[in-house]
Image (cartoon, helix red, strand yellow):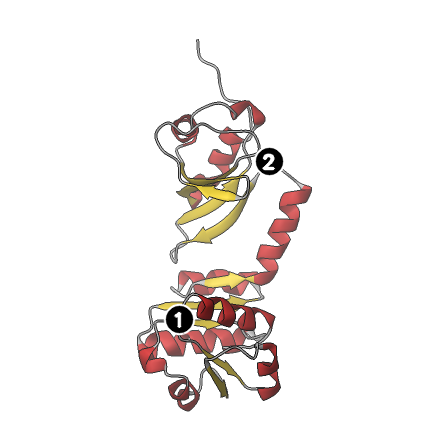
Amino acid sequence: MGCGRVGASLAHELESRGHGVAVIDQNPDAFRRLDETFSGRKVTGLGFDRDTLHQAGIEDAYAFAAVSDGDNSNILAARVVRETYGVDNVVARIYDPHRAEIYQRLGIPTVATVRWTSLQVLRRLLPLGSTDEFRDPSGQVRLAEVDVHAAWVGKPLRALEEASGARVAYVTRYGAGVLPTAGTVLQENDQVHVLMRTADADAVERVLTVAPVVTA
């Protein structure tokens, strides 16, 4: 739902991967953002209206993304699709970060646009910290990119895990994601992405953003 820049980009990306796609927007002019090669359905209407959803083929849908420019519309559509039609893979774009956290706890995965953008800017202004990349619906577990002190370079990733209590999910190395093995060693300029309990986030940062403790 939503054929703005994000919606149109998602539609093309999904179609390029071989998926059947239907795009809903209440403004028919919005479909001009779609390339002429787009072969999916274009449905004019409200994304939380049942007739509109039926035209889009909601009964056969595997996933639904609510990415219009209205928070209320996105949440309402996401809830209707999940609760009425039983679509499990649902995500809603939310501009208000406080509301996004509330809906996340209600089990509706959200992308808080403003919060994500501000965190990315802060990350570049104020290094040595962590930036959320994902939280589970309960908010208890988070995946975050954590800045690691340069003194950790050359040490195995398992040493980071043992010291911090977090789990290294993957590292970004030269722009590509790398799944760690038992012998993976941290290299210079690696970006480290860890899984941790939300309650432990501050402690994990305190360990990884300083030089490792040298034991005799």
Which residue was labeled with disc 1? 19
Which residue was labeled with disc 2? 128
User: Quick one: which residue is furthest to the bottom in this view?
Assistant: 51
Which quadrant of the figure contains the C terminus? top left
Does residue 120 sit above or below 4 in this rendering? Answer: above
Q: Secondary structure at mark 1?
A: loop
- For the point 41% across and 61% down, the residue is 105
- For the point 44% across and 13% down, the residue is 215
List x then y, in percent, for residue 171: 47, 39
- For the point 43% across and 74% down, the residue is 78
Which amino acid lies under the numbered mark 1 shown in the image of this protein? His
Structural crowding at the residue carrying mark 2, measured as other residues with C-alpha within 10 Å and reported as few (<14), some (14–19) or many (≥20) = some
Which amino acid lies under the numbered mark 2 shown in the image of this protein? Leu
Q: Earlier in the sequence, mark 1 or mark 2?
A: 1
Q: Which mark is residue 179?
A: none
Q: Secondary structure at mark 2?
A: loop
Left or right: where does residue 28 sit relative to residue 92? right
List x then y, in percent, for residue 170: 43, 41
What is the CA distance from the residue labelled 1 to the residue labelled 2? 40 Å
Does residue 163 sit above or below 138 in this rendering? Answer: above
List x then y, in percent, for residue 23: 48, 79
